[in-house]
Image (tube, helix red, strand yellow):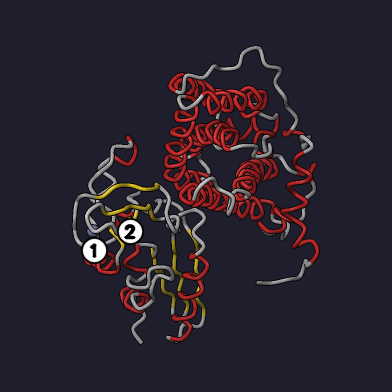
Amino acid sequence: MSNALFQYTLRLGDSSLILAQRLSEWTGHGPFLEEDLALTNIALDTLGTAKSFLEYAAQVEGKGRTDDDLAFFRNEREFFNPLITEQPNGDYAKTMVRQVIMDVYHLYLYKELAKSKDTTLSGIAQKAIKEVTYHVRHSASWLERFGNGTDESHQRAQDALNELWQYTQELFETPGSEKELLAQGVAVNLQDIQAKWETHVDELIRKANLKKPENVFMQRGSLDGIHTEHLGYLLAEMQHLPRMHPTAKW
Amino acid sequence: MLHSPGHILSILQQVPDPEIPVISIVELGVIRDIQVNGSAVEVKITPTYSGCPAMKQIEDDVRAILKKEGFEEVIVKTVFDPPWTTDWIPEEAKEKLRRYGIAPPEHTTQDKSWLTGKQKTVLCPRCRSANTQLISQFGSTACKALYQCKDCLEPFDYFKCI
Ligand SMILES: [Zn+2]
């Protein structure tokens, strides 16, 4: 039980941590000042949620590790974030398409998790819902603007959608270890969320006059710690400082 | 020394918010519960935003002031449920925010316009004009949005209603 809960919480934490790391790469590089602030704020919210999940994961594990240990001293194969979160930012259209997919996913995931029998998980989720509601408004408005903007912005948004769609099915996969947590009302039923996610994302794609990709070969692997080549580079940047100075305090 | 939760609350009233020092952490609404047991005290705090970097500072400040007041053991715990809301900021504190140049949260979260995206009128904290516009949903810190007054032309922070 507690090992399953550790794995479950760890995956929730990894998902937010890696997405936050990607978003923070825009800090100081945003297309204009307000967007730079927006992305940095969204990165901070997402990192805060990651920290809450990883603190709880460390506590559930009970081996004396901290949230920092989990973030900085695990290797690529020990991370369980969905593949889409580690995909490079690309242009702003790609970052926003990835963000639409993840914001809508998080919105419904946290709405369900807020009802979890595990009071810590439900508390973190209730907190996150308020923030993610703002995030969805932000990314959805950009998708609409790109889709209905110039030929160039439309094409870039469509290209991003076509490229990222292959990573969407994996978001709704449930590992065997979660069955028990699901029965206990601790974990969330991802199949229920998938239906809500699809309806919402379909509507956003339609409003942006974009085309939903069809017959896409769906990638998978993160449930087993198998990642795309991008995660290793991301971790190298994220982890190098604490690994070089493991006893540093600030 | 009077070791009642009310007494401790009055001590914590003296701790300013690290980012907006014109209001106290009690007025901000992050103090959720106080338990006293002799010279030991446990304070429960809740974050304003998940990633609010001021939370660690608030925790340290609570510990420091209560130690100074003679409590030997001070435990500060973070709780998430119920999630923080701007509804917990009292009217007097909202007036302090306004005088400081930050437009306070308008109305309460019962008003669901923040969900539907319909914008409400935010008054300029400087000239009180209602002729203002939203520049960005995201401002200088997680709790604020960026507005501009179209009369006096000053940009200003708006404390988001959540
Ligand atoms: Zn004005």
Rendering coords of residue A235 (x, y %): 75, 49
Callout 2 touching callout 1 (CB < 8 Å): yes
Q: Which mark is residue B156?
A: 2
Rendering coords of residue B103 (x, y %): 28, 58
Rendering coords of residue A2 (x, y %): 67, 45
Query: Which of the image's four quarters has the C terminus of chain A?
Result: bottom right
Rendering coords of residue A193 (x, y %): 52, 26
- Specify whether tag 1 is near ligand 1 (CB below 8 Å): yes
Crowding around mark 1 (Cα neighbors within 10 Å: few <14, some 14 to 19, many 20+) is: some
**Vertical relation: A206 (above or below) A129:** above
**Which residue lies at the image location 60% right of the left edge and 17% below the top edge?**
A213
**Which residue lies at the image location 52% right of the left edge and 67% below the top edge?**
B56
In which chain is the residue bearing label 2? B
In which chain is the residue bearing label 1? B
> Front-most of A120 and A228?
A228
Q: Secondary structure at mark 1?
A: loop
- Specify whether tag 2 is near ligand 1 (CB below 8 Å): yes
Q: Secondary structure at mark 2?
A: strand
Q: Quadrant of ligand 1?
A: bottom left
Looking at the image, the residue that sits furthest to the top is A215
Inspect the image, locate mark 1, and give the three-letter code of the amino acid beneath it.
Arg
Inspect the image, locate mark 2, and give the three-letter code of the amino acid beneath it.
Phe
**Which residue lies at the image location 42% right of the left edge and 39% below the top edge?**
A133
Q: Label 1, on which residue?
A: B126
- Residue A120 in the figure: left or right of residue A80: left
- Residue B44 in the figure: left or right of residue A49: left
**Which residue lies at the image location 73% right of the left edge and 34% below the top edge?**
A222
The picture quadrant where one finds residue A134 is top left
- Residue A120 in the figure: left or right of residue A175: left
Is circle 2 on the same chain as circle 1?
A: yes
- Residue A60 in the figure: left or right of residue B15: right
**Vertical relation: B39 (above or below) B119:** below
